[in-house]
Each structure stands twice: as C-alpha cells, then as structure tokens.
Amino acid sequence: MRIAQVVPLWEHLPLTNHRSAEYSISLLTDELVRRGHDVTLFAAAGSDSLAWLEPGCDQPLAEAKVRLQEYLLHEQIQLSRVFNCPGRFDLIHVQGSLAALPYGQLSKTPVLHSLYEPLSALLAQPPKALNSSKMASLTGSNFD
C-alpha cells in the first residue's frame, strides 16, 4: 500500500521523548515500512525514518522560531503538496492537523485524521460540512 504520513513541521522525527506523539508517529511509520508498505513521510528536514522523506521545510519550525502565521503558511504548502497528487497514494494519514480536515473532503484518496489534543465541545462533533465517509478516524488523546 502507498501511504502518505503527514506530520506537523514543528519538530523532526523521532523525538526521544517516548511519550510524545512524534515518537509514536515515528514507530508507526517505520513499522509500516518494515511490513512492506511504500510510505512517504511529509515532515521537517532532518527527520530520521525508514520511509521516503519529503521535507516540508529546511529545519523544524520550532528551531527556526517562526511565528504562528508563518507556521500556518508552511502547513498549508505541505498539505497542498500532499493533496495535489491524485492517485499517488492509497491512503493519506494526517497527524495532528485540524487544517487538513477540509482537504479530506476534496480528496478521492481515503484520509485518516489523527488528532492528539482534546477537542473543544464545538469541535467534538465535526461540522456537517466535514462529515464524510472519507474521514476514517478522528481520535483524541492527550498523552498525559
């Protein structure tokens, strides 16, 4: 299976903190490769993975000390690169990005959304505009 793993650009993978979402994402990505899947990791440059890396920025954006607005621009550029490749992937797995939810509506490729922060009551039920069979999962956990 051809899988796109899309992760936030704040940090590189993996972080050494075994309780971080980035560490869990790294384990999942590498295990998918070991099991024979063709995985492309969309992440910050310098990420260490068995997957093919397509960097979304030259360094983790936390290290670059970018402002939130600049981060959001980098995130949108990365998401547009992922979702502008019809037929390239069999599954797109987006980790921790609410900004990707509307992209899933436009994709013919199945999209799995994994969110790691508790959602407010407003977003606990996704807006009707985002309800779709293409939204395979919306998870919440805070790793505490």
Image: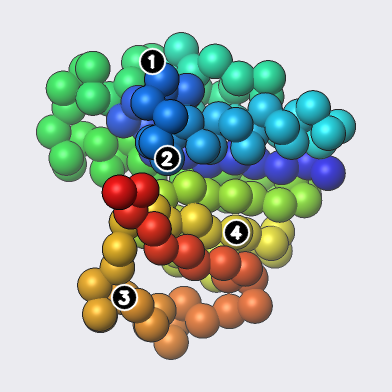
Which is in the foreground here, disc 2 or disc 3? Answer: 2
The relative height of residue 141 versus residue 93 in the rendered view (above or below) is below
Measuring 38% from the left and 36% from the top, which residue is drawn there?
A: 20
Q: Earlier in the sequence, mark 3 or mark 1?
A: 1
Secondary structure under badge 1?
loop
User: Whole-percent x and y of residue 92?
Assistant: 64, 50
Which is in the foreground here, disc 1 or disc 4? Answer: 4
The relative height of residue 132 versus residue 8 in the rendered view (above or below) is below
Look at label 2 and name its amino acid. Ala
For the N terminus, the quadrant is top right
Look at label 4 and name its amino acid. Leu
Q: Residues within 10 Å of mark 2 (few under 14, many from 20)?
A: many
User: Whole-percent x and y of residue 78?
Assistant: 45, 38
Residue furthest bottom as drawn: 128
Look at label 1 and name its amino acid. Asp
User: Whole-percent x and y of residue 91?
Assistant: 71, 52
Would residue 6 appear left or right of 142 to someone viewing this image?
A: right
How far separated are the C-alphas under marks 3 and 1? 32 Å
Secondary structure under badge 2?
helix
| Residue toward you, 53 or 78 | 53
Secondary structure under badge 4?
strand
The relative height of residue 127 versus residue 65 in the rendered view (above or below) is below
Residue 136 appears in which quarter of the rendering?
bottom right
Residue 57 appears in which quarter of the rendering?
top left
Q: Earlier in the sequence, mark 1 or mark 4?
A: 1
List the residue tagged with mark 3. Answer: 123
Q: Earlier in the sequence, mark 2 or mark 1?
A: 2
Look at label 3 and name its amino acid. Leu
Q: Residues within 10 Å of mark 1 (few under 14, many from 20)?
A: few
Would residue 55 appear left or right of 35 to someone viewing this image?
A: left
